């Protein structure tokens, strides 16, 4: 099988620029003009232009057309990578019917992320698609590099689990603005008109907090990574506050420790883990009236549990802890009362949305999908009951 048609167009534009026939700032033939020249569909030429735009080879101007970028990447390296991709497989793309799907995520673990990965992989197999995985280790820079790399590889669409961060990833914004098939999972970007699938974090946090309130706790603390520009964490904070307010309890800002960094993938995670332990210990000592915790992430609940155990405290006699996601103990019972996120459904919906975009069947009225959750009782609280949304 020869070079896919969209890659032929992509290669043609690169060759035109490398040879000097197209200079910086020159107008590039339109998608329609190239489609006619090569006898391909507009969808094919659009995909080639999407790749060139994401690689920063061309710049698009609404109503004016596309132009060779004033500041170009290393075109020789891009051409070399393209040649290597072609030579690495005698057949090029495995099958013209099969799609190439890119998945970008910070990390995955048994508590959360692994079932999401399994679900997406199963959906790819079901739909005769190939999956390429890139991990970003929680780095926005690595996330941007991963997206650019997958676009250059020629993926038909992307599923991205965005990293925590104060600023939106510029590569994700470019994908959205260019109309490239994209679905965000676990969270959405406020003010950005993108497709996304995520848990009902607000009501899940309400349910967790109400669990503690129903047990008679009122001095409840929230522990979390920084919540800025991470919708999942922001909504968990809002749900926690709303649950307290509904019982006429004024949320105390001093009961919210939201500067913990050890759950974020990092090259200095051990150092952050030690720092978070000190923060938590100081927080507990300074607020002896607190007797229950809502942890926004499972790893923080584990860190807190270990610290309290070392301090001679017991769960749930001295403290109760609830959290998002959990593992089971040696007897097969969850250690923590927790929110079980439906990762399998999240992966399935994400793939459905992505394949619809690729096929031109996307519906803008259903861009955001909220996935339900289950409240699971563990050993960290007193009342033994099960709840479900």
Image (cartoon, grey):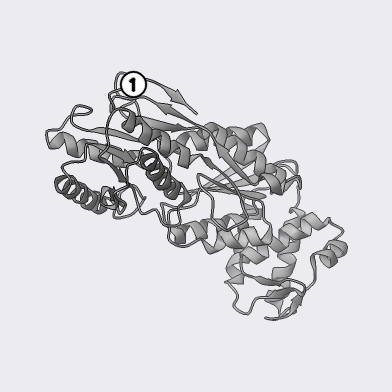
Q: In the rendered image of this protein, does residue 171 appear above or below residue 133?
A: below
Residue 318 falls in image quadrant: top left
Nearest the camera: 131 or 209?
209
Q: Is residue 187 left or right of residue 87?
A: left
Report which residue position mark 1 lands on.
Answer: 333
Residue 11 in the image: state x and y as whole percent.
Answer: 71, 64
Name which residue lies at 26% across and 48% down: 255
Name which residue lies at 32% across and 29% down: 336
Q: In the rendered image, is residue 307 in sight? A: yes
Residue 57 in the image: state x and y as whole percent.
Answer: 64, 70
Q: Is residue 181 left or right of residue 201?
A: right
Residue 222 in the image: state x and y as whole percent.
Answer: 31, 44
Nearest the camera: 349 or 375?
375
Query: Which residue of the protein is positioned furthest toward the front in this rendering?
Result: 248
Q: Secondary structure at mark 1?
A: loop
Total marks drawn? 1
Label 1: how many Cα within 10 Å (few below 14, some 14–19, many 20+): few
Q: In the rendered image of this protein, does residue 18 appear above or below residue 155?
A: below
Name which residue lies at 36% across and 50% down: 264
């Amino acid at each position: 099988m020869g070079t896919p048609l969209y890659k032929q167009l992509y290669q043609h534009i690169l060759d035109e620029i490398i040879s000097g026939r197209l200079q910086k700032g020159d107008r590039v033939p339109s998608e329609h003009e190239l489609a006619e020249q090569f006898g391909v569909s507009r969808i094919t030429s659009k995909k080639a232009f999407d790749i060139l735009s994401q690689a920063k080879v061309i710049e698009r101007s609404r109503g004016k057309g596309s132009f060779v970028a004033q500041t170009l990447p290393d075109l020789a390296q891009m051409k070399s990578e393209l040649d290597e991709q072609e030579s690495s497989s005698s057949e090029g793309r495995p099958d013209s019917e099969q799609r190439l799907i890119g998945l970008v995520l910070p990390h995955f673990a048994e508590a959360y992320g692994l079932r999401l990965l399994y679900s997406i992989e199963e959906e790819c197999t079901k739909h005769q698609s190939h999956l390429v995985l890139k991990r970003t280790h929680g780095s926005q820079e690595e996330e941007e590099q991963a997206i650019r790399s997958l676009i250059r590889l020629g993926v038909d669409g992307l599923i991205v689990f965005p990293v925590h961060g104060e600023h939106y990833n510029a590569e994700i914004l470019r994908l959205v603005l260019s109309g490239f098939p994209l679905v965000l999972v676990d969270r959405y970007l406020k003010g950005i008109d993108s497709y996304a699938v995520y848990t009902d974090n607000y009501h899940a946090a309400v349910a967790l907090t109400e669990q503690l309130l129903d047990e008679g706790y009122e001095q409840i603390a929230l522990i979390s990574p920084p919540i800025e520009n991470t919708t999942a964490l922001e909504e968990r904070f809002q749900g926690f506050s709303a649950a307290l307010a509904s019982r006429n309890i004024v949320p105390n800002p001093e009961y919210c420790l939201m500067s913990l960094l050890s759950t974020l993938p990092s090259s200095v995670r051990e150092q952050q883990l030690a720092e978070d332990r000190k923060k938590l210990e100081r927080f507990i000592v300074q607020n002896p009236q607190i007797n229950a915790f809502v942890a926004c992430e499972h790893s923080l609940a584990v860190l807190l549990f270990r610290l309290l155990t070392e301090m001679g405290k017991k769960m749930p006699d001295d403290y109760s802890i609830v959290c998002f996601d959990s593992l089971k103990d040696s007897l097969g019972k969850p250690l923590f009362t927790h929110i079980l996120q439906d990762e399998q459904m999240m992966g399935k919906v994400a793939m459905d949305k992505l394949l619809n975009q690729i096929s031109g069947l996307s519906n803008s009225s259903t861009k955001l999908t909220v996935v339900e959750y289950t409240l699971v009782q563990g050993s960290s609280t007193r009342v033994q009951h099960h709840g479900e949304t």
